[in-house]
Amino acid sequence: MSQQGQDERETYDHEAMQAAWLPVWDELAPFRSGTPGDDRPKKYVLDMFPYPSGDLHMGHAEAYALGDVLARYWVLRGYNVMHPIGWDAFGLPAENAAIKRGENPRSWTYENIAQQKASMRRYACSFDWDRVLNTCDPEYYRWNQWLFLQMFNRGLAYRKDGAVNWCPSCQTVLANEQVVGGMCERCDGPVTKRKLNQWYLRITDYAQRLLDDMSQLEAGWPSKVLLMQRNWIGKSTGAKVSFEVEGRDEPITVYTTRPDTLYGATFMIVAADSDLAAELVAGTSVEVELVKYLEQVRAASDIERQSTDRPKTGVFLQRYATNPVNGERIPMWASDYVLADYGTGAIMAVPAHDQRDLDFALKFDLPVRVVVESDSDPKVTGVAVADDGLHINSGPLDGLNQDDAIAKILDVLAERGTGEYAENFRLRDWLISRQRYWGTPIPIIHCDACGQVPVPEDQLPVRLPELAGDQLRPQGVSPLAAAEEWVNVACPNCGNPAQRDADTMDTFFDSSWYFLRFLNPADDSQAFDPELAKQWLPVEQYVGGVTHAILHLLYARFFTKVLHDLGYLEFTEPFTKLLNQGMVVMNGSAMSKSRGNLVRLSDELDAHGVDAVRLTMVFAGPPEDDIDWADVSAAGARKFLARAWRLAGDVTSAPGANAADGDVALRKVTHKMVHECQLAVEDYRFNVVVARVMELVNAARKAIDSGCGPADAAVREAVEAAAIILSLVAPFTAEDMWARLAHAPSVMRAAWPQVDPALLVADAVTCAVQINGKLRDTFDVNPDVSEADLQEMALARPAVQTALAGAQPARVIVRAPKLVNVVIAS
RNA sequence: GUCCGGGUGGCGGAAUAGGUAGACGCGCUAGCUUGAGGUGCUAGAGCCCGCAAGGGUGUGGGGGUUCAAGUCCCCCCUCGGACACCA
């Protein structure tokens, strides 16, 4: 290498820094959180754990960069921060890979975990590597089974027949939450319906609490997520109303949110696929017709059902019910627009005031009666009238508005014993059975004599049998069912031959409580330690994608309440604050191989270095916004890091130099920037944090080159502050700066700089002078200037004098010390 | 269809309580450094008119409240997301 004399600049060598500092950090373990006797206040910062489907990608890089800013910040602020990581390691991709490779899913899964773990270390994630878990380890899923049994014993886990979502491609059932727009969340294939006997968790028992406890989350969760959950839970209020049915002993109850329109109910609809519908036509000539209709309905995929303007279909059941308030005989129909598993599976149709009912009525020429005053006639316009208004044709409700009419009709119904106030939830129980291999076996044994027998706790875990390759091929029943040696066991109760439940649990079960397992991941005596939970939980800060707004977050909230009720947890909400980061996209769309816009994280890290990539992620914009990688510059980030790093080499004062002796102007910048960074971090405005550090670096550069000079103590103070703040985002660079500043490692053990409030007061502020609201002049003033003085100074400005032209201002607004607005009447 | 977010320079984005719009950066231009490229440094810049001083205009569009509006209110356009026959 040729020497070029004094011009030779030191080079910022990120590769060398990585090589130098990773081993040091391993040694120092600055993010260890389990040390006994550590009396720092505790804080739990959690990143949503990844699914190990290959190496980390750009999305992970963003999420973990953001989580790291928070975790590292709180460590610097003196907290004992628990920041663990694990792997959500059960699931279909591993199984599909195993089939292809002729192996057990374990090998593929653990290979990917090892790779991701290595990438996380390279990426300098501030995880506590003593707190790690994989959900596919028997040591973990054992406690899934234990939890399941706790629920089973209390009736919260139960089996029932039902029409369930079925993914023909994945060959398994899906929870409602996993059907996205009629498509399978996993494979994007169309979802169909199947009647199966499956396991459910009684999340609907918790619907009201899931709703009510959101008040605890209002301050810490994005309102968007709360709204999505609220909508998903979907509470509605109304009434249950009983209709006598000709030729049937029992009346039929319907649920309606508009009991006030009861006088306008001109027919009744029963869910076509309900038992009720079948019963109503049993043995009649309509029976065949209904079956035929049902076949036709089933043939229609969910995608067709999606279409908003899909014409209504149905079958007249040749039966009649009686409207309880006016005694009117109304025909009964079956249709697929009424859902069997919502409300009572039957509705009173009020075509004048419900669009769907109107569509049906017009299609089948059924009567339409307006019972709420309106200018337009739904029968003519085809548009149902849903607005509030005065009731007509409604007996005792006539002349009342909607609220009053609802109150009145409830009275009337109560009096006659034919109806009452009722609530309904859109939320359904959580279907957790899956007909796949790579998941937690359901710890139940089916015995002809004893029924569903829980596996005794001392026999947990029920381990997965060793299956590989073609044995895992989906066939509509769980691959476990074919593992005869595994399936066939003696009943724990009576000892007779019995069978294990061959389904596995939805993997969302695993992730619904993993945050508790981090407390003591190696504990083989209990799922988690309630005592430790008391100390560390709830999770103070949760970081993850908005894709989990409903599924994972709702389930985790549900589990927390269940565990609370079981006496294991004192709190009822698991995550106090939630940050949803956006996605990393490329040229406007989600990255994918098929689109050809995939950016590989490892390539970016090779090209720019870890710190530059992290900095780019954080600086790109607000964390919840998407980042278009094409719009940001990792090269620019690297340039800045090199600038900051060089700064550290230019400081000539010794460590411990008394900052109080330093240049006051620079000190003011430093303290202001530290202060603003602090506010910005706590407000998730990480991009602004970076901007402020940049300003600090610029100020220090200027001070060294053309100000107080490199020996001034204020320069050291500024550069040290920059290094500490930068460590949130660019740990390698910051650590190297710290070393160049002649400090022992690690910068992560430094304390967040103390802000001196006296230094936050500016010497002078710029006062804006407006004339009629338009900026015409500025001048510097003392921040303490009085309103009167400021007004006088402003009025004396030439620009104002000229504008006034000798006249008096009509009005002067003074906001000392920042602004004076002189209003001149025209 | 319903419900939520957004729309600020060429680009990513800043903007405590309504109070100097465009912080910070990318890209760009000019100059210095360099054998060249890159790096580094200095300066410039919303747009329009002007050599300049200066003026006009400006946060999707229109209206309103106010001394003052990116920020508050009403209407519209547009992009994105969630839910999607839940009675």
Image: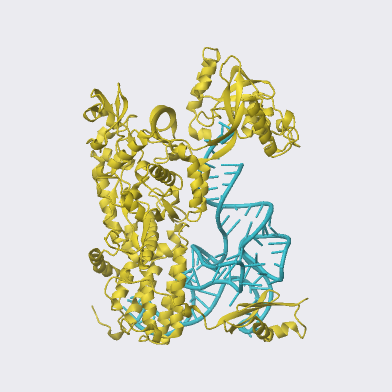
Chain colours: A yellow, B cyan
Q: Give percent across and percent down for residue B29.
A: 49, 76
Quadrant of the snapshot with the C terminus of chain A: bottom right
A7 is higher (above) or lower (below) than A285: below
**In which image quadrant can residue A260 be found?**
top right
Instruction: Say which of A314 and A750 sits in front.
Output: A750
Left or right for A553, reference A26: right
Above or below: residue A824 compared with residue A310: below
Residue A384 in sight: no
In front of the other: A540 or A737: A540
Give the percent coordinates (x, y) of residue A798.
68, 86
Q: Is residue A145 left or right of residue B61?
A: left
Q: Considering the image in quadrants, where does the N terminus of chain A appear?
A: bottom left
Residue A25, given in percent of the width and then of the height, sits at 26, 65
Q: Is residue A244 above or below residue A633?
A: above
Q: In the rendering, at what x and y percent does residue A388 appear?
A: 70, 39
In the displayed structure image, the side of residue A201 where residue A770 appears, left or right: right
- For the image, the number of numbered tags is 0
Left or right: residue A655 compared with residue A167: left
Foreground residue among A393 and A795: A393
Answer whether residue A402 is visible to the viewer in this image: yes
Tell me: residue A626, above or below residue A110. Answer: below
Residue at point 67%, 75% (across, down): A774
* Nearer to me, A558 or B16: A558
